[in-house]
Amino acid sequence: MATAADLEPADSEPESDSAVGEPDARVGTLAAQIARRIEADVIRRGWPVGESLGSEVDLRERFGVSRAVLREAVRLVEHHQVAKMRRGPNGGLFVCAPDAGPATRAMVIYLEYVGTSVTDLLHARLLLEPIAAGLAADRVTEDGIDTLRATLGDEVAHWDEPGVHSQDPLHPVLGQLSGNPALHLFIDVLTRLTARYAHTSRRLSKAEMHTAKETSHEAHRAVVDAVIAGDAARAQTALGAHLESVAAWIEKHRVRRRGPRIAGNVVEPELVEGPRAKLAEVVAARIHDDIAARGWQVGQVLGSEADLLARYGVSRAVLREAVRLLEYHSVARMRRGPGGGLVVAEPEPQASIDTMALFLEYQGVTGDDLRIVRNAVELGIVARVAVRQAEGDAEVADRLAKAVRWTTEGPAEDARKADLFHAELAELAHNPVLSLFLSIITELFRRHAAGRDRPLPGDTAAEEVQHVHQRVLDAILEGDAGLARHRMRRHLDALISWWH
């Protein structure tokens, strides 16, 4: 692992006391806008890894901003792994190839905080993973078959190691073999989060552990056999049954704890301490884990800057960059003055939404990829909301009716008003995983359109969109879940035309 000296920024320069503390909101807002423009430019260029976007001077002139604003924007762009600033002769901001680490961490940070339950996770997995298994069966190659058999072999090779469902690589492998980047990434996150519940299980006897592992392995073998045979229906059925058994196992063995939050470290060391990681990201992840371990007490002071420097053993420059990352994710904020210090904040999802959307854009997700995932997520949401309505939840009709009207009644400058109906449906389903996934997909649509100078229809199609939303709502209120799903599916299929 790299040492602090190895990872210390070579060009770290003294910063004023205002570098940490309550930042100038105008600088932060403008920097975020510039970062978004830089990222849209990268998308527009087809994400040309290694290409220079310009020197610091070029970029300041192009965007007409100060050095402080540009450097803050570059920090955000670097955190998203869209581009990296290279100092010295022939330096500049160069496009880079992102990996899934920051995207995964960002999602886990938010889902850990909001109290995602094992029921939420397994419901999302049951919607997405059988689809991945079916696609893998349709698309499997000789190399894919080798990968599947090697994965099963690894399970047997590590048979005696502790943990039952904690390391379950077959599921992400199926996501990868589906050929759908969105499915792959979402399944990877869901598998990691489910593993945290397995880690909270009561201690098992050797006999119980052996039985659990044997059962899991046999289920995996049945799925793999179906995929290799090209039998998509059997693969989907076998994986669905396996996930049901995983849910039952975790529910039976999980140790009950106070509060709904996922236990354990939310940021795995291997995701942040690799060769590409910066020391500030490692420190930010460790501070985040400390916050999670204390029960995420919003408003709690973790310590002054001096305290944190001593606790984490890093330089002032590294700590301040780590704090910026924490502030970006709304994990914690530095407060100045008497009684100040790093204060635990309430996370918000936009940081993870932005990071995931950018990563999927880089992965070359297609309109058909999104159609498959969005249909699964939104049709699952519609089904759950229809059940709530049938059970007499008055909130459903009220909130959705307002969302339908907002499509035409909302202000023209509200670019997201057409999405409110979909967002409200997701909130009413009471599953934070599905709500976050849907937000990522809609954000990806916006970034993709902006990167290709193709504005979404907006007000030009407002009346038509309102009509479609009303018809979906009418079916829900009539208790006809099947019709509501049919109408939503047709609506989503029409939206995909805007991807191209």
Image (tube, rainbow, N blue to C red):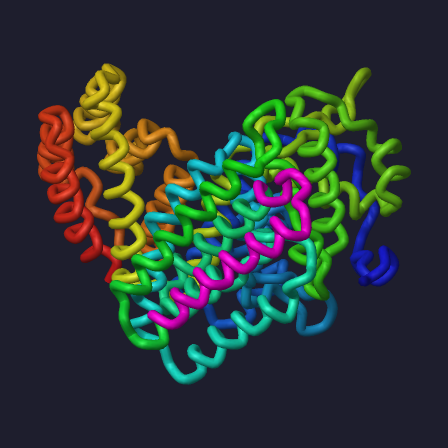
Q: Is residue 208 magenta?
A: yes
Name of the residue lying farthest toward the bottom: 142
Eyeballing the image, is 54 above or below 121?
below
Task: Return the residue nearer the eye: 13 or 213.
Answer: 213
- Residue drawn 68% across the image and 64% down it: 276
- Across and down, in percent, residue 167 comes to 59, 57
| Location of the N terminus (image quadrant) | bottom right
Kindly tell me whether residue 461 is visible in this rendering: yes
Q: Position of residue 375 (x, y in %)?
A: 25, 49
Q: Is residue 332 left or right of residue 260?
A: right
Q: Give how far across and how far down residue 356 sits, in percent.
A: 47, 51
- Residue drawn at (57%, 48%) of the image: 195
**Compared with residue 224, is residue 101 higher up or lower down, i.e. above or below?**
above
Q: Nearer the viewer, residue 335 or 223?
A: 223
Magenta region, mostly helix, strand or loop? helix
Give, as a single range, the part of the protein colored magenta.
Answer: 197-226
Asked if the magenta segment contains residue 286, the reply would be no
Q: What residue appears at the point 78 percent right and 21 percent down from the top-left corner?
A: 340
51 w.r.t. 409: above or below: below
Q: Quadrant of the C terminus?
A: bottom left
